[in-house]
């Protein structure tokens, strides 16, 4: 674990059977739709709590706020994303909840690769 990106998880142990069951439910089409629709709310919660709270938190998923520059507007855009770490790298997937088109943040990254990553600011 590096100091630059402290891995913050909310919830239970990564190997728990409860977590595996919850992740199985999360991968269903109705749950994917619900998560997609709740993303704007989750973005606000994470931003206002400085990364301390998130809708994905109870499932033990490491979550970050990715800030990119809008490809068309030039404005900063914030996206809450689950990530995977293989030190020193962080991996994110532009799956857009399984939809056929890519999420907007991937277009933003292609247009301007300058980004900011916010992983929970404090341990308390």
Image (cartoon, helix red, strand yellow):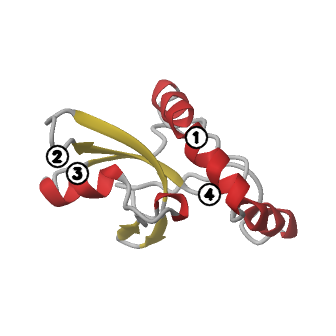
Instruction: Determine which residue is flagged by label 1.
Output: 37
Tell me if label 4 and label 2 are in contact, CB under 8 Å: no
Instruction: Determine which residue is flagged by label 2.
Output: 71
Q: Earlier in the sequence, mark 3 or mark 4?
A: 4
Tell me if label 3 and label 4 are in contact, CB under 8 Å: no
Q: Please rate how many residues cluster around mark 3, counting C-alpha atoms within 10 Å: few if below 14, some from 14 to 19, many from 20.
A: many
Disc 2/disc 3 C-alpha distance (Å) = 5 Å
Q: Please rate how many residues cluster around mark 4, counting C-alpha atoms within 10 Å: few if below 14, some from 14 to 19, many from 20.
A: many
Q: Please rate how many residues cluster around mark 2, counting C-alpha atoms within 10 Å: few if below 14, some from 14 to 19, many from 20.
A: some
Lateral position of residue 45 relative to residue 60, left or right: left
Instruction: Determine which residue is flagged by label 3.
Output: 108
Tell me if label 4 and label 1 are in contact, CB under 8 Å: no
Q: Nearer the viewer, residue 4 or 67?
A: 67
Disc 2/disc 1 C-alpha distance (Å) = 22 Å
**Is residue 46 depicted above or below 94 in this figure?**
above
**Is residue 103 depicted above or below 1 in this figure?**
above
């Amino acid at each position: 674990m590096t100091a630059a990106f402290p891995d913050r998880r909310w919830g239970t142990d990564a190997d728990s059977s409860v977590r595996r069951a919850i992740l199985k439910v999360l991968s269903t089409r109705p749950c994917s739709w619900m998560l997609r629709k709740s993303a704007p709310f989750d973005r606000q919660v994470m931003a206002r709590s400085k990364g301390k709270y998130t809708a994905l938190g109870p499932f033990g998923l490491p979550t970050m706020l990715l800030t990119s520059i809008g490809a068309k507007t030039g404005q900063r855009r914030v996206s809450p994303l689950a990530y995977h770490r293989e030190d020193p790298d962080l991996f994110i997937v532009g799956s857009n909840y399984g939809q056929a088109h890519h999420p907007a943040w991937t277009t933003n990254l292609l247009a301007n690769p300058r980004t900011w990553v916010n992983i929970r600011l404090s341990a308390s």
